[in-house]
Structures are given as structure tokens and as C-alpha cells.
Image (cartoon, helix red, strand yellow):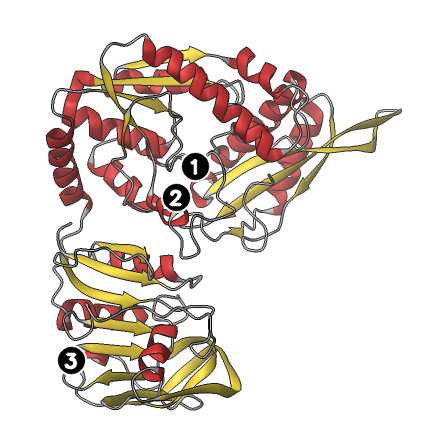
Amino acid sequence: MQHNVLILDFGSQYTQLIARRVRELNIFCEIFPYNNPPQDLSSYKAVILSGSPFSVRAEDAPHPDLSGIRGKLPMLAVCYGAQYLAHFNGGEVAPSNIREYGRANLSYIKEEELFLQGVQTGSQVWMSHSDTIKQLPENGVRLASTNDVENAAYRLDGEDTYAIQFHPEVYHSTDGKLILENFLVKIAEVPQNFTAANFVDDIVAELKEKLKDDKVVLGLSGGVDSTVAAVLLNKAIGKNLYCIFVNNGLLRKNEFESVLHQYKDMGLNVKGVDASDRFLTALAGVDDPEKKRKAIGRVFIEVFDDEAHKLTDVKWLAQGTIYPDVIESISVKGPSATIKSHHNVGGLPDFMKLQVVEPLRMLFKDEVRRVGATLGIDPELLGRHPFPGPGLAIRILGDITPEKVSILQEVDAIFIEGLKANGLYDKVWQAGAILLPVNSVGVMGDERTYEKVVALRAVESTDGMTADWVHLPYEFLMKVSNQIINKVKGVNRVVYDISSKPPATIEWE
């Protein structure tokens, strides 16, 4: 991980996609806000400037200090970055006569340019801006055009600085990955050595050096992230890792027992703690989603702290934090106002005098799964759908009662088992059921009923940042709906959620 690519974020919705495309080239990269870059640039081989919702002509637009980068490191400026270089270096940026948004095709490509090697005339690119570069900067050399955008790509003569007005990171730019590869591998000569196997070797060595003979406590959730973190730590420090799996009473049906059973064969030192009553008591009468999260977080810390105090000389708390959580907590505009309180970034109370170790904090979700596969973790466990930290509490809209939890556990079990039985589970990123605070009229036999409504949710995604609803077969939905209504007392109506993220979120609360 010593050969880094630095991505400076100007607030673009696509910044994480740039990082993902770079990682797909087996190149390690990091995202930093443009206004808080790393002080030491010595380990970086190249820099990418992201797009931005701002116009470079606006007074409050981001104005980065590039003096330590430009001309010293190969640099690729995307969209806003391209316009910024032009605007402040003798070029001209002005509002476009037409809104340059969506698909376009390259109508001109300068020959014998390494940056665009392998890209053919007619290649589709994705535009997303309302300004355009009317005139290149003083030493600018045009590399590509579309029918509407004359300066779609350019370079600065005499330095390894390249700029493009389109987004190579999005799926719609058909040669986008090739362009990134040309820049990073052929021009910047960044080694492609970021693989799951190399990551495991590097992080285990790093953990051994950092933790030495110290004891570490880790809260297991049964999910992919905490499990992979546990196996990595176990590989590094063995018996000095103590895992605690807390049942908050809001897990899936029989999940506490089944997860503990799964861990038996993994060589981990795991203790199960059933604190269901404690959590449900704290949630009684609470219906606000954020208050639910905070109540669950508070009780979890109390339970976890109680258990940790039963161990002696523990110095570290391990967490399964992954990179999207980290990025969200250091956004361009400061920590995101929408960051949910169950995220693991900096969430330790003062009274827990433990240092934090996060082995996965630089990985995306799919990378975590690849690392898990390299470690030999059971594919069934690695293929588990993500499950929210607060559990079913945020899938029960309104207040929480043991009866509601029981209803939702039964509904969820029928849905998830149905997906597995019909070969659909692995085609879905995340699935679950939501208990709505709505009763609906129904008829069962000769009797009129007035019972609960449940919504089923299934989405496809790569890392959870964006998601589309899954087109589950009608026959499957019909069968599952019938099973739920016939088998779960208290439910007489099932609906299917067909919202994508954005604008909706995956969870309802």
C-alpha cells in the first residue's frame, strides 16, 4: 500500500466511484478533502482531482493549493478540476450554450497520445456540467473533442498534467477505465500491487507490529466486516483477541444461536451475551429513528463495557469500520450531517479508555469479501447480506415491542429462506422486511380483519452507496406473500418496495 494515488475530493457525487475504478486496477488510492490534504506527499505516485457541484466562477467555489502537486506529480483533473486548471491558468471557462449532461461521443482524438491510447473515435463518455472550457490554459494541448464540447480533454505541455471534462469513473464512459489505466500505469507508472493477498500480508504484519502482546476486544455482529476483521486479528495476535457477540433482541430469527455455531469452527475466542431484555426495555415507547439508534448504541456500549471489564489488561478495541464510513466522516463540508449514529467512526465514549484498531478501514465492501475469501472464510458467511447495526429496530416503524419484533422475525425468515430456496439470495445485495405502523382491512375466511402491513425490500448494489430495487419474479412474490399472510399471525397485507437509492435509502429509517 506504499504506492498511493491521492484523490482530492471537491464534493462530487462520483468521487467514491473514482476510487473504486482505481482499486479495480489493483492500485491503492485514498480520498482526502481538497481543503485538508495529507501533509506528506512523498508516498504518492499520482493525484486525481474530482468533479464538484460548484462552478469555478462562483465566489464560494473550492480553490485548492496545488503548488505542492502540479508539475511534481502526475495529475489528472476531472470535470471541475479540468475547468479549475483552465480558469486560473490563462484559459476561459464560461456557461455552456447547451447543458452538457449525459452521454456524448468523442468526435476527435489526437493521435499518438499515451493518455488516450486504445480509445477510438466515437467512444461514449459521460458529461455532467453546465460550464464549459471555451479556451485552453496557456500551455494547453487539446487531446479530444465531442460534437458539442471542443475541449473535452487536454494536457499541459511540459508536465504530466491531464484534464478531462467528462467522467471516466462512471459506467456510461465506455473507455473510462482504460483512460484511468493509461494515466496511472503508463504515464504515472504506479505499480498494480494492491491485491487481497498482498493486503492480508501487509495488514497482518502491521497489526503484529502495532499490537505486539497487547489484548484486543472486538464486538462481533455476525456480519462480513466484523468477521473478516476478527480473522485478520486472530491471524496476527491469536489468543490475545477476545470477541464478544451481543444479542440485542433485534437480530433475525435464531441468528444469535446460528452465528455462535458458525464461529465454533473458525478458531476464534468468542463469548455470546444475551442482553435482549436490556435493549427492549431501553426501547420501550421510543419511536423516533435517531433516538432508537442512540438508545441501542448506549446500551450496547454499556453491555460491551461490562463484558470488557471482566477481561484484564485489555488495551485495544477493534472495529469493523470500512472505507465508505471513513469517507463520510471526513467529507469536504466537514463530517456529514446525515451520518448515522451507528457508524463506527470515532464512536467511543470517554469512559472506555481503549485505543481503536480498524483493520478494514481502507477497504470497500467487495474488497472486504475478497480479503475474506483469501483468508479461507466460508463463502456462505462472506455472501451474507448486510444487516443494519440497530437490527430490526429500524425496520419496525414506530415504537418497539417484543410482539412486533416476533412478527417481523417470522416475516423476515420466510422472505430470506424463500430467496435462498429459489436461488435468488446471491443475486440480491440486501433484503429484508419492514413492519409498517399501518393496519389494513382484510378478510380471512368469513371474518373481517384489521391487521399489520409489511413491506418487502430487495436491492442490488456493489457497495451500498447506490442501489436499485430487484425485479423479483412475480411468482416468487406471490408465493412469499401467501406464506407470510397464512403463517404469521397479525399480518394481512404484503407490499413490495420498488424505490431506488437515491432518492430513497435502502433502510426505511
On the image, the x and y values in percent for residue 183 come to 20, 72
Q: Quadrant of residue 136?
A: bottom left
Q: What amino acid does circle 1 point to?
A: His
The residue positioned 39% from the left and 43% from the top of the image is 325
Q: Is residue 36 left or right of residue 492?
A: left
Q: Which of pointers 3 and 2 lies earlier in the amino acid sequence?
A: 3
Q: Which residue is mark 3?
A: 159
Distance from label 3 to label 2 (Cα)? Answer: 35 Å
In the rendered image, the residue lying farthest to the top is 310
Looking at the image, residue 437 lies above or below residue 9: above
The mark that comes first in sequence, 2 or 1, is 2
Answer yes or no: is residue 255 visible. no
Q: Quadrant of residue 352?
A: top left
Left or right position of 100 against 444: left
- According to the picture, the residue beneath numbered tag 1 turns out to be 343
Assign a secondary structure to mark 1. loop
Depth order, front residue of 402/350: 350
Q: Secondary structure at mark 3?
A: loop
Amino acid carrying mark 3 in the image: Glu
Contact between labelled residues 2 and 3, with CB atoms less than 8 Å apart = no
Among numbered discs 1 and 3, the one appearing first in the sequence:
3
- Please tell me whether mark 2 sits on a helix, a strand or a loop: helix
Q: Is residue 71 above or below residue 34?
A: below
Q: Amino acid at mark 2?
A: Asp
Q: Is residue 280 left or right of residue 352?
A: right
Between 199 and 30, the one nearer to me in the picture: 30
Q: Which residue is mark 2?
A: 325
